Image (tube, rainbow, N blue to C red):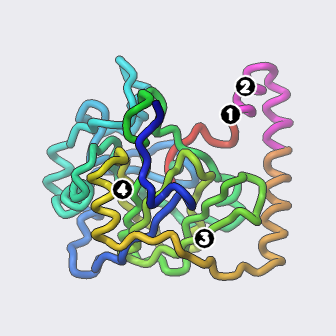
Amino acid sequence: MSYIKSAALEETGFVILDRYEQAKDPKEWLDLEYVEWKSSGDTRFAPLTSAKGEIEVNGFWNHTPPRTDKDGVWIASQVEKAPTLARRAQEPGANVGRCRVIELKPTEYAEALYNLHQDDNNRLNPDGNGWIVRGFFNLSDDADSCLILREERYDPDTEVRIPLPAGAQIIVDTQRFWHAVWHPGPENRYCLITSWESGPQLDAYIEKWHGTSEHTSAPLDPALAADAEHEVQRRLAERAAALAERGSSGAREAARGAWGASDA
Ligand SMILES: [Fe+2]
């Protein structure tokens, strides 16, 4: 047995869909109710689904009973405020787990690198089921921002940078990639993030929106890149030292990485 995965994502781990005409829709994300949450960067979330239909964003596996990132319960008060976003999340017809709008404050490149993390979407997902991947629909117009993906956390040569103008639609195996968003700002960034179960429905959706893995990242200033790598190592060393002072519980925390896996 093995997980059902999308052939379109198999080689590169991501697909970029046709750009959505975001400007024709109302800015529903500004009407939603947001909650604070620890994540990669300075963020708040507005859940459209949650484990039990309440306005909270904890991983479904942290609830009782713990379960995998599927069968999200739609939150009526939020769907009422953002019917278009809810419709878009359900368009593939694939099982939806967590579905939420992220609000990200501006972040420097070095901070984004420090925030790189892998998601935990497939925790408790039984072998033989569809692999959970995540859709990113950029809502605000952040053409100078990008989704950073790395196959290897500390290897910049594995880095892919995908720009995030309004309407950008990207599907990513976020458990495979180390990922975070570099968002220079100055305004907050808003993005709809949806967990979908891979399978024939998602495959058909990717095909309908002409999903492609062909992408060439715009070049990065080598000096900025080198400075950022140095800064990340400095911050990691600083954090490791602080955790070491706290003893074995700190060491366990350090082993889990900078973040306990969340969103981008
Ligand atoms: Fe994430």
From the viewer's perspective, tell me whether residue 7 is left or right of residue 27: right
The residue pinned by badge 3 equals 161
Q: Which mark is residue 101?
A: 4
- Crowding around mark 4 (Cα neighbors within 10 Å: few <14, some 14 to 19, many 20+) is many
Q: Quadrant of residue 124?
A: top left
Which amino acid is tagged 2? Answer: Arg
Q: CA distance from mark 3 to mark 4?
A: 21 Å
Q: CA distance from mark 2 to mark 4?
A: 31 Å
Circle 2 or circle 3, nearest the eye:
3
Decide which of tag 4 and tag 1 comes sooner along the chain: 4
Q: Is residue 69 magenta?
A: no
Residue bearing mark 1:
256
For marks 2 and 3, give the CA distance: 31 Å
Amino acid of disc 1: Arg
Label 3 environment density (alpha carbons within 10 Å; few <14, some 14–19, many ≥20)? many
- The image shows residue 34 at horizontal and vertical percentages of 34, 50
**3D distance between C-alphas at marks 4 and 1:** 25 Å
Decide which of tag 1 and tag 3 comes sooner along the chain.
Answer: 3
Q: Residue furthest front?
A: 1
- Which x, y percent locates residue 256? 68, 33
First in residue order: circle 2 vs circle 3: 3
- The residue depicted at 45 percent of the width and 38 percent of the height is 3
Residues shaded magenta: 238-255
Residue linked to disc 2: 252
Looking at the image, is 183 positioned above or below residue 143?
A: above
Asked whether 193 or 199 is in front, the reply is 199
Residue 228 at x, y = what percent? 78, 65
Q: Main secondary structure of the magenta part?
A: helix
Find numbered disc 1 in the image and state the secondary structure of the residue it sits on.
loop
- Residue 172 at x, y percent in the picture: 48, 57
